[in-house]
Amino acid sequence: MTEAKLIRALNNENLSHFSKTYVPSRLLLGPGPSNAHPDVLSALSLNPIGHLDEAYISLMSDVQKLLRYTWQCNNRLTLPMSGTGSAAMEASIANFIEEGENILIAKKGYFGDRLVDMATRYKAQVSVIEKPWGEAFTYEEIEYEIETKKPAIFAIVHAETSSGVLQPLEGIGDICRKNNCLFLVDAVTSLGALELLIDEWKIDLAYSCSQKGLSCPPGLSPFTMNKRAEEKLSSRKTKVPNWYLDLSLLNKYWGSDRVYHHTAPVNMNFAIREGLRIIANEGLENVWNRHNTNAKKLWNGLESLGMELHVSEDYRLPTLTTVKIPPAVDGDGFRNHLLRNFGIEIGNGLGELSGKVWRVGLMGFNSCEENVDRLLNLFDTELKKFSIFESSTF
Ligand SMILES: Cc1ncc(COP(=O)(O)O)c(C=O)c1O
């Protein structure tokens, strides 16, 4: 078909019946995205301005200051990368790994696997330590592996969204420094929601996302790196094999010079400024307490309804709870019922937990008592309709 004929064929389809874009209203209580705060949505809908406009450059500095507070660090290179969490995840690998270099990845779920996949693509020498999905590593296990394998980088997921495990991080930074290794942390499901002290815990590199604790839509990935990481980056022998995520190029825009690299998604940066401002207004410790309190209320409520939680309370993740689907229940049926009839999203299990657990998220703006009560009430009244047997006890 020639080009002209193709255009005519498409036009013949009559596209004028499309209505204005509409999306249904949802309460997102799954693994993410979470709902955006109304003030974030207002900021997002402002008219764009130029990404080198002095007003925008001043907004960039606000975002960086607010991000340093939220990360609890003084790192000069703290910035929101363009792209979802996986973009900053890939930047952390692409910039700090050279071919053949050793990286040790502690894997206890789906996102540990993604780190392994990325590191392999960048031709790292990858070593993996593994835990079952639902458990965390002990300090001693990590110490032993770093001391024997002597990796250039040690990477671990703080809040594993696939299993619902919160990995304790305190002390690991000291092991890494003693062994001349960089400490890389995935904080996608913890930043802006759970205690995370980048400087105090001696984390050299970390990345996150905009769509969970920061109450923004997906689209940006906050990233931070300290002087140890800067030194490693400047000692590279080869070019970073990814132009878009090259931190030395991004540094020219987000560092002091503000020189064009790519057109910044300006509206997403309006949004993240607002999401971070709301966190600073509430106070970081209050934000952490709110997430912990609402998670405990959810856990107690679910257990008193006879539900079993997948992860033991010692390392259960407040932002994402994995709830075992009782054997006598149609898990997908219940999940779809909540979405279609109540506009509430909860998640299915991911990877090896698919069909075995539901994933319930309480993140950012959505972590509130009212949402917990609403969901518990639905577990109480609706779940029995999805019992495969007559009995409604689980
Ligand atoms: C722990 C973790 N790491 C990385 C990612 C990837 O982030 P994104 O999907 O925003 O690219 C996710 C996504 O939910 C995540 O939960």
Image (cartoon, rainbow, N blue to C red):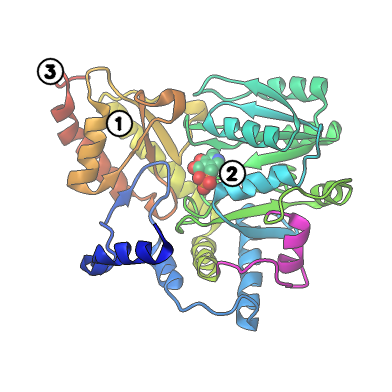
Residue found at the very far left of the displayed protein: 390
Query: Which quarter of the rendered picture does the C terminus lie within?
Result: top left
Q: Residue at x 36, y 23 (%)?
A: 356
Asked if 309 appears above or below 64 in the picture, the reply is above
Q: Which residues are magenta?
A: 245-265
> Which element carries disc 3, helix, strand or loop?
loop
Indicate which label's residue lies in the foreground, 1 or 3.
Answer: 3
Q: Residues within 10 Å of mark 1 (few under 14, many from 20)?
A: many
Residue type of the residue flagged with mark 1 = Leu
- The residue wearing badge 2 is 187
- Residue in the foreground of this view, choosing between 317 and 15: 15
Residue type of the residue flagged with mark 3 = Ser
Q: Residues within 10 Å of mark 3 (few under 14, many from 20)?
A: few
Q: CA distance from mark 1 to mark 2?
A: 26 Å
Left or right of 149 on screen, residue 323: left
Contact? badges 2 and 3 (CB < 8 Å): no
